[in-house]
Image: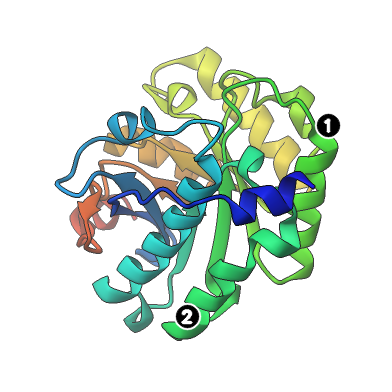
Amino acid sequence: MVGCEGCRAAAEQFDLAMAFQPIVDVETGHPFAYEALVRGPDGESASEVLTRVTPENRYAFDQQCRVAAIEQAVEAGLLATDAKLSINFLPNAVYSPVACIQLTLKTARRVALPTDRLIFEFTENERMVDTDHVANIIATYRKMGFATALDDFGAGHAGLGLLGRIQTDLIKLDMELIRDLDSNMSRRLIVDSTVGLLHRLGITVIAEGVETEAEYRTLRDMGIRYQQGYLFARPALRALPALNMPAWRAAA
C-alpha cells in the first residue's frame, strides 16, 4: 500500500523555520489566524526550501512542516491569543487522511494547542489529478473538527472548475485579483461577483496580498471581513508580528 510505504520511508530531515503572517479580522482589528509560511533555518525563502522537495521525500517534508508550524507558533505565543493557525499542506503527500494526521494531532496535544484552532490550507498550482482524493481529505478533516482553505483562488487551476468539485470552509482570493482593486473596475466587478457566489455557497472569503489602504477600504466595502497582506504585517520569522493597527483604524 502506497500510504504505508510513505509512512515507513526513512524520513529525510529538513531544517525548517516558520514565518507567521496574520489574517486580520478587520471588524475587530485582531488576528483571525496566523498563516505559517515555510522558510529555511536562516530565513531562506520558501522557493529555496521547496527545491529540495521530491516525490520521494514530500511526505516527510509535509509532516515536518506541520510539526514545525505548530511547535513554533506555540513558542511564539499563539496560545496567548484567540487566533487560529493556518498550516499549508501538500495534498499529494496525504496517502490516508486519518493515518497522515496522527503526528499532527500528537504534536498539538503535546503543546496543548486545541485542534479546533487548526486550519489546513492548500493551493493547486497544477491541475489536480485526483479530485476525489482531495475531496476525501477535506471531508475527513471537517469531520475531525478542522477547517480547510483553498489558497490562490482565481489563479492557475484554482478557479470555478475546481470550486464546482470541491468546497472548502475558506477561500483565499489570489493577490493578483486584489492588486489595485480600488482603481480597476474589471477586477472590482470580478471580485464582487466572486464574493457573492462564495457567500451563497457558505464559504468564508479571505483577501490576500492587501498592500494599500485603498485596497483595504474597497474590500471592506465589499463585505470581506478577513484580509491578509503587507498593509497589516509582513511575515515574521519564528514570531507573531505586531499589526499595523493605524491602517485599519484610520479607515474604520
Q: Tell me if I can see residue 147 in this picture.
A: yes
Residue closest to the eye, 211 or 42: 42
Q: Position of residue 206 (x, y in %)?
A: 52, 46
Residue 126 sits above or below residue 22 on the image: above
Residue 73 sits above or below residue 198 on the image: below
Residue closest to the eye, 185 or 36: 36
Q: Tell me if I can see residue 88 in this picture.
A: no
Q: Residue at x 70, y 38 (%)?
A: 196
Helix, strand or loop for disc 1: loop
Q: Is 250 placed left or right of 47 in the picture?
A: left
Q: Residue at x 43, y 53 (%)?
A: 65
Kindly identify the amino acid type of the residue bearing the numbered disc 2. Answer: Leu
Residue closest to the eye, 190 or 73: 73
Residue 153 sits above or below residue 83 on the image: above
Q: Position of residue 81 (x, y in %)?
A: 36, 78
Residue 52 sits above or below residue 91 on the image: above
From mark 2 to mark 1, how far is it between C-alphas? 33 Å
Helix, strand or loop for disc 2: loop
User: Which residue in the protein does label 2 denote?
Assistant: 113
Kindly identify the amino acid type of the residue bearing the numbered disc 1. Answer: Gly
Q: Is 132 placed left or right of 129 in the picture?
A: right
Q: Is 170 placed left or right of 36 in the picture?
A: right
Name the image quarter holding the C terminus.
bottom left
- Camera-nearest label, 2 or 1: 2
Mark 2 crowdedness (10 Å alpha carbons): few <14, some 14-19, many ≥20? many
Q: Which mark is residue 164?
A: 1
Q: Position of residue 235 (x, y in %)?
A: 25, 48
Q: Residue at x 70, y 71 (%)?
A: 145
Mark 1 crowdedness (10 Å alpha carbons): few <14, some 14-19, many ≥20? few
Q: Position of residue 120 (x, y in %)?
A: 58, 55
